[in-house]
Amino acid sequence: MSIINQLTLFVDVVQQGSFAKAAALHDMDNSSLSKQIKKGTKHPIIMEVKIHNKIGI
């Protein structure tokens, strides 16, 4: 799954207010949804943003 799709899943969790609702929206189980979001947080672009936020850039 691409980083764009993983970020879309994350946004849907926020908009829906729960993992269960977002998972149902994408016809996925909660575990699969959670794993995809976790993979997205390991993407180099996301890691760079985390580092910049941590050091205040």
Image (spheres, helix red, strand yellow):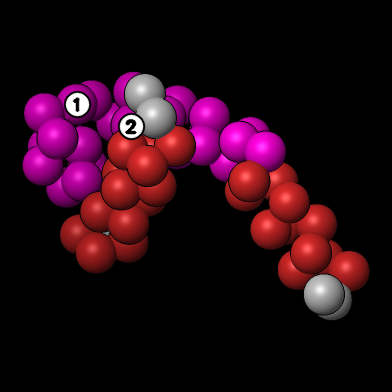
The magenta-colored residue range is 18-44
**CA neighbours of label 2 inside 10 A, class few (<14), some (14 to 19), many (20+):** many
Give residue 18's position: percent from left, percent from top.
27, 53
**Location of residue 57 by image quarter:** bottom right
Mark 1 element type? loop
Residue closest to the eye, 57 or 42: 57
The image's mark for residue 57 is none
Please report the residue visible at 31 percent of the width from the left and 48 percent of the height from the top. Answer: 8
Looking at marks 2 and 1 on the same chain, the residue that comes earlier in the sequence is marked by: 1
Kind of residue indicated by mark 2: Leu
In the rendered structure, does residue 35 fall within the stretch colored magenta?
yes
Residue 21, percent from left and from top? 16, 47
Is 51 left, or right, of 55 in this rendering? Answer: left
Cβ–Cβ under 8 Å for marks 2 and 1: yes
Position of the N terminus, as image quadrant, is top left
* Mark-to-mark CA distance, 2 and 1: 6 Å
Looking at the image, can residue 31 be seen?
no
Q: Which mark is residue 33?
A: 2
Most distant residue in the right direction:
55
Amino acid tagged 1: Met
**For the point 75% across and 68% down, which residue is it?**
53
> Residue 47's x, y, as percent?
70, 46
Q: Is residue 1 visible?
A: yes
| Residue 34 is covered by the magenta coloring | yes
Residue for badge 1: 28
Front residue of this view, candidates 36 and 16: 36
Q: Is residue 34 left or right of residue 41?
A: left
Question: Considering only vertical position in the picture, is 47 above or below 2?
Answer: below
Residue at coordinates 11% horizontally, 28% vertically from top-left?
27
Q: Position of residue 43 (x, y in %)?
A: 61, 36
